[in-house]
Amino acid sequence: DQQVKQNSPSLSVQEGRISILNCDYTNSMFDYFLWYKKYPAEGPTFLISISSIKDKNEDGRFTVFLNKSAKHLSLHIVPSQPGDSAVYFCAASWANNLFFGTGTRLTVIP
Amino acid sequence: EAQVTQNPRYLITVTGKKLTVTCSQNMNHEYMSWYRQDPGLGLRQIYYSMNVEVTDKGDVPEGYKVSRKEKRNFPLILESPSPNQTSLYFCASSLTQGGSDGYTFGSGTRLTVV
C-alpha cells in the first residue's frame, strides 16, 4: 500500500510561471518530508526538506509547504526554468525508512 | 568530490547466476540504503544499514542480501536472480537515519535478468 502518493504523473508549465507539485501521505508518524529531483540516467538529487513540526521551508526558488491536518505537502518552484524539467519525487521519513511517491514529471516550456 | 559510486551501471544476466552490485561512498556516512525503482511504484527500499555490521530489511528484501563490513561499502547481492528483479537499482547514503538531511544517491544500476 502506497504511503506516499503523487497523483499527478505529469505537469507542464510555462517558463517564468509557478510550478506546484503535490504529494499526499497516509502515515501520521512521518517526521520529515523531502523532495528529490531526478534527471534521466542519474540518481535522485536532494532538493529540500521540511520537519513535521514546521509548515513551510524556503530555499531560493523552492518552497515546501506542509499541511499536517490534510496530510498534504506541496513544492512550489518560482520562477520555473527550463532546467527544472525533470521527475520530482516526494518522500517521507520514518523508522529508518524513506518512503517515496511515484514521481511527477515536470516540463517547463521555454 | 562527495559521491556514491555504484558499479556496474548496466548489467544483463541470466536467471540463477549470482551477481553483486557494488556501492561505495566517500563521505564517511554511517547510514546506507538500497532502493529499486519500478514504473508506477516509485523507489522502494530493499535493505538499509545503520553502521558497520548493522543491517536490516526494508520494504522489499526478498531475493536480496547485503553486507556492511566496512563503513564505505555496501554491496547488494542477488544469490539467484529472477526476471522479476529486473529493475533500476540505487544505492544511497546519509549522515542521519531516515535521511532528513537528504540522501546522496548513486547514478543507478540498470539490471536485466533474462
Image: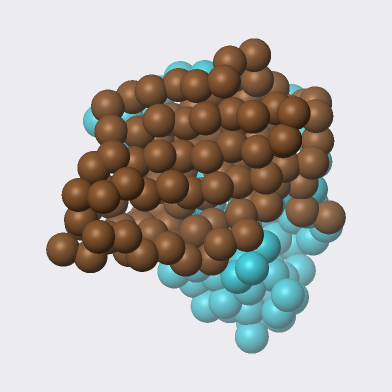
Chain colours: A brown, B cyan
Task: Find residue B81 and report its horizontal and vertical position in percent.
Answer: 72, 71
Q: Quadrant of the N terminus of chain A?
A: bottom right
Q: Residue at x 38, y 59 (%)?
A: A106
Q: Residue at x 32, y 29 (%)?
A: B2
Task: Find residue B59 and report its horizontal and vertical position in percent.
Answer: 79, 48
Q: Name the image quarter holding residue B113.
A: bottom right
Q: Nearer the viewer, residue A6 or A102?
A: A6
Q: Name the image quarter holding residue B49.
A: top right
Task: Find residue B108 and report its horizontal and vertical position in percent.
Answer: 46, 56
Tell me, yes or no, if residue B65 can be seen here: no
Q: Name the image quarter holding residue B88.
A: bottom right
Most distant residue in the top direction: A53
Tell me, yes or no, if residue A63 can be seen here: yes
Whether residue B3 is situated above or below residue A41 in the rendered picture: above
In screen coordinates, is B75 left or right of A110? right
Q: Quadrant of the C terminus of chain A?
A: bottom left
Q: Residue at x 56, y 62 (%)?
A: A8
Q: Residue at x 27, y 27 (%)?
A: A60
